[in-house]
Image (tube, helix red, strand yellow):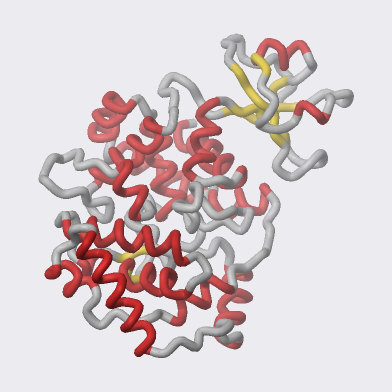
């Protein structure tokens, strides 16, 4: 889902690895520097020739047949497949620029995205409410994730998923992980969910408008419109329901929010900061934590943690269970806070 330069970390476990900004590299100056690097710096040690790749691919096909993938699917999927040099460049030259939280939020939470989010929430209100009732996930979070992951379906990646995964599986740096994802992608094709020419995604294989890796697709993608296919590339029902199913099965609480920004007292014990420490809201209130405007914390009570993504001089947030679920989607505080704050802005 966005590939974050922490800004982000490799996404949801290894499988969401390329989540947030591999789809739209967040800022013009980062893009310029990054693409300049790619244009003028050749990838390290990409010396294997086509003959070696073809031999490797033959072994992959043999294993795929043993796994039950049809010969017709393999012939279709691997037609003209060859290593994609640009994928290797992107994998080996990921920028290490670290944006501050505010810099990242300025990029993700724009007035245009807020306005579009409100429009989409209204446009798909009936469908979102139906999905929300079944999975107990509030519509605003589904629309927000959709917006952050693919700009509401506008930027889903234009790499052939099979070619990208085959390249990364062959390359060797993370071959075991990407080999597994390649077999999962072949299963998706073999099951008839999408034709190979439509199976496009990010350079690391994240697919569709919610940017699922193939293994994530198999665990969470849903055929909500019951047409016999799961289409996270074009069918809004399947896109929203798959996102909702992911959150629901990851422990989402449909009657709770994600968290809020807070103010800490001067004497606050910094040992309490971090997700490892949980206290009830009333306890944080007693310890001097207050709302951003200086008022009391909410009267409802549940376990919460205090985080400061940019350190002691940065902003402070009180986060709840649903925030932790967002971190399962993409393991970046920047990403999770962007989703929470943008969802608040969309419905405010």
- Image coordinates of residue 299 in percent, x first then y, are 61, 9
Q: Give whichever of 210, 78 is nearer the camera.
A: 78
Residue 291: name its quadrant.
top right
Residue 347: name its quadrant.
top left
- Image coordinates of residue 242 in percent, x first then y, are 30, 41
In the displayed image of the protein, which residue is found farthest to the right? 267
Q: Up-down: is 332 above or below 318?
A: below
For the image shown, how many numbered marks are present on the structure? 0
Q: Give whichever of 25, 1 is nearer the camera.
A: 1
Q: Up-down: is 247 above or below 111?
A: above
Q: Residue at x 34, y 58 (%)?
A: 207
Q: Residue at x 57, y 73 (%)?
A: 92
Q: Residue at x 70, y 52 (%)?
A: 100
Q: Give whichever of 260, 284 is nearer the camera.
A: 284
Q: Up-down: is 76 above or below 314?
A: below
- Image coordinates of residue 338 in percent, x first then y, are 56, 43
Q: Would residue 246 be found to the left or right of residue 24 on screen?
A: left
- Image coordinates of residue 296 in percent, x first then y, are 70, 14
Q: Would residue 98 be found to the left or right of residue 87 on screen?
A: right
Q: Residue at x 44, y 28 (%)?
A: 251
Q: Would residue 199 be found to the left or right of residue 294 on screen?
A: left
Q: Give whichever of 298, 227 is nearer the camera.
A: 227
């Amino acid at each position: 889902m966005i590939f974050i330069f922490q800004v982000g970390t490799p996404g949801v476990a290894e499988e969401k690895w390329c989540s947030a900004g591999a789809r739209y590299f967040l800022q013009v100056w980062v893009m310029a520097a990054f693409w300049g690097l790619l244009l003028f710096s050749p990838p390290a040690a990409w010396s294997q020739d086509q003959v070696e790749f073809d031999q490797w691919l033959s072994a992959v096909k043999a294993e795929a047949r043993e796994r039950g993938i049809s010969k017709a699917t393999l012939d279709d999927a691997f037609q003209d497949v060859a290593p994609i040099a640009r994928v290797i460049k992107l994998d080996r030259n990921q920028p290490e620029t670290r944006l501050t939280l505010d810099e990242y939020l300025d990029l993700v939470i724009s007035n245009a995205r807020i306005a579009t989010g409100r429009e989409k929430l209204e446009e798909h209100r009936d469908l979102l409410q139906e999905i929300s009732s079944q999975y107990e996930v509030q519509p605003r979070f589904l629309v927000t994730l959709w917006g952050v992951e693919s700009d509401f379906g506008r930027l889903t990646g234009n790499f052939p998923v099979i070619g990208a995964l085959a390249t990364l599986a062959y390359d060797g740096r993370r071959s075991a992980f990407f080999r597994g994802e390649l077999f999962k992608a072949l299963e998706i094709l073999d099951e008839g969910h999408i034709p190979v020419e439509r199976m496009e995604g990010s350079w690391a294989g994240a697919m569709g408008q919610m940017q699922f890796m193939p293994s994530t697709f198999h665990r969470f993608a849903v055929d909500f419109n019951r047409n016999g296919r799961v289409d996270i590339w074009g069918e809004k029902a399947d896109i929203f329901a798959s996102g909702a199913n992911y959150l629901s099965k990851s422990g989402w609480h449909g009657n709770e929010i994600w968290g809020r920004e807070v103010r800490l007292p001067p004497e606050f014990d910094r040992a309490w900061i971090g997700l490892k420490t949980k206290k009830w809201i009333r306890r944080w209130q007693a310890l001097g934590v207050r709302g951003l405007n200086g008022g009391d914390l909410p009267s409802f009570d549940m376990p919460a943690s205090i985080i400061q993504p940019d350190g002691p001089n940065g902003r402070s947030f009180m986060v709840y269970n649903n925030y932790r679920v967002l971190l399962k989607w993409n393991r970046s505080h920047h990403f999770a806070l962007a989703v929470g704050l943008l969802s608040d802005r969309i419905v405010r």
